[in-house]
């Protein structure tokens, strides 16, 4: 079964790299210590020595392997150089071309490469580059969304394409054991969860953001946040009061010409947050928290409490195992 592990980890449960810095060392170490695959999130700018420090801090909190996510749409070459030097277990990449040379370099350093894709065509491309596994993201996912298909239609097509050559990991709208079993039934060997881990005790998300994840149960696919910094990158957000009053934004508007509504320290740098920015509030954020972007997947309504990340992993395994036993009895 999928919970028996992939890529050398105890369990096939991956914690998504939550941007910009929501999946920090504490969250990643907690997931790793529970036997899952925890992923740090690299900065969206070149900060190689900072990345080295992030990796080494995580290693003080766990002796288990873990990974780090890099968005290829932003400057990343120096960050990846350090990731390979530090021999992190998994390099997760997203939103860009996965060059075969990068995969070869990573493999030479003993690092596994796991891209996230949103279409069958993108899966074909990364398969040709020799990657070690692939994350298939459905449109149900929170945060930035690279494809247009739902996970139930896309996942089995990628599974058929891959044909057992590498593990396929399902992402998008999975928060509990039921979603885990559904993904396994469609041929996945693991799952990748974002929103469920944002709503964990160790996540670096602002308490108000976590509270809204419990309180609200509706999301929307939109493009209103972060247009200037990351154009052409639609996303799924919570339907907060601010968003519901906004809903749409004229095409010529973006965060660049808006007023500053808050401040944050992100990966050690002080940042202004303007209205309509794509930056979610972390624990250091001050200002109009309720008026900032809050990413969440479609199954957010199933998240009813903030749990320790290790308990999230344990519950997923227990729920999935119990459900499979029950289903086999009733076949």
Image: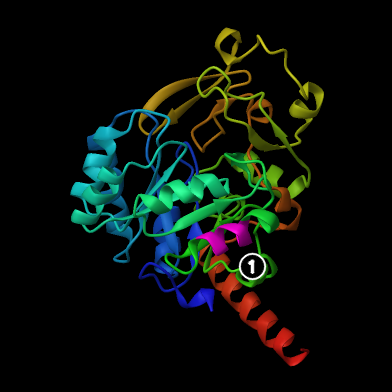
Task: Single out the residue that lies furthest toward the right.
Answer: 245
Question: In the picture provided, is 194 more to the left or to the right than 90?
Answer: right
**Residue 16 in picture, x, y percent from top left:** 50, 51
Instruction: Report helix, strand or loop for mark 1.
Output: loop
**Residue 237 in picture, x, y percent from top left:** 68, 37
Q: Residue at x 36, y 55 (%)?
A: 131
- Using the image as rendered, state which of residue 171 and residue 309 is in the foreground: 171
Q: Is 328 drawn above or below residue 63 in the view shown?
A: below
Question: In the picture provided, is 269 more to the left or to the right than 247?
Answer: left
In the rendered image, the quadrant that contains the N terminus is bottom right
**Residue 142 in picture, x, y percent from top left:** 63, 44
Q: Which residue is mark 1?
A: 186
For residue 156: magenta? yes
Q: How is the image coloured?
A: rainbow
In the rendered image, the quadrant that contains the C terminus is bottom right
Type of secondary structure dominating the magenta stretch: helix
Q: Residue at x 57, y 65 (%)?
A: 312
Q: Residue at x 57, y 27 (%)?
A: 278
Q: Residue at x 77, y 45 (%)?
A: 216
Residue 223: image quadrant is top right
Q: Is residue 278 visible?
A: yes
Question: In the picture provided, is 122 more to the left or to the right than 269?
Answer: right
- Using the image as rendered, state which of residue 301 and residue 71 is in the foreground: 71
For residue 23: magenta? no
- The stretch of residues the image draws in magenta is 155-161
Q: Using a 10 Å C-alpha cutoff, classify the residue at mark 1 as few (fewer than 14 neighbours), some (14 to 19) or many (20 or more).
A: some
């Amino acid at each position: 079964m999928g919970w028996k592990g992939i890529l050398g980890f105890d369990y096939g449960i991956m914690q998504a790299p939550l941007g910009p810095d929501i999946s920090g060392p504490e969250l990643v170490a907690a997931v790793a210590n529970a036997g899952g695959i925890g992923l740090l999130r690299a900065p969206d700018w070149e900060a190689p020595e900072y990345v080295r420090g992030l990796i080494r801090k995580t290693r003080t909190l766990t002796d288990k392997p873990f990974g780090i996510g890099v968005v290829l749409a932003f400057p990343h070459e120096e960050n990846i150089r350090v990731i390979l030097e530090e021999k992190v277990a998994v390099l997760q990449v997203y939103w860009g071309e996965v060059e075969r040379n990068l995969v070869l370099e990573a493999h030479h350093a003993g690092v596994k490469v796991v891209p996230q894709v949103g279409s069958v065509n993108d899966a074909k491309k990364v398969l040709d580059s020799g990657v070690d596994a692939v994350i298939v993201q459905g449109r149900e996912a929170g945060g930035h969304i690279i494809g247009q298909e739902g996970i139930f239609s896309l996942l089995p097509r990628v599974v058929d394409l891959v044909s057992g050559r590498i593990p396929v990991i399902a992402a998008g709208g999975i928060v509990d054991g039921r979603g885990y079993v559904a993904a396994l039934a469609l041929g996945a060997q693991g799952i990748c969860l974002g929103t469920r881990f944002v709503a964990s005790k160790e996540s670096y998300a602002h308490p108000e953001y976590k509270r809204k994840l419990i309180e609200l149960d509706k999301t929307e696919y939109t493009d209103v946040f972060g247009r200037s910094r990351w154009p052409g990158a639609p996303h799924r957000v919570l339907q907060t009061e601010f968003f519901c009053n906004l809903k749409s934004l004229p095409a010529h508007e973006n965060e660049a010409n808006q007023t500053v509504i808050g401040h944050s320290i992100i990966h050690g740098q002080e940042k202004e947050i303007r209205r309509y920015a794509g930056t979610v509030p972390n624990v250091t954020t001050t200002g109009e928290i309720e008026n900032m972007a809050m990413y969440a997947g479609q199954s957010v309504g199933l998240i009813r409490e903030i749990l320790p990340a290790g308990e999230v992993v344990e519950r997923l395994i227990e729920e999935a195992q119990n459900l499979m036993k029950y289903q086999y009895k009733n076949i």
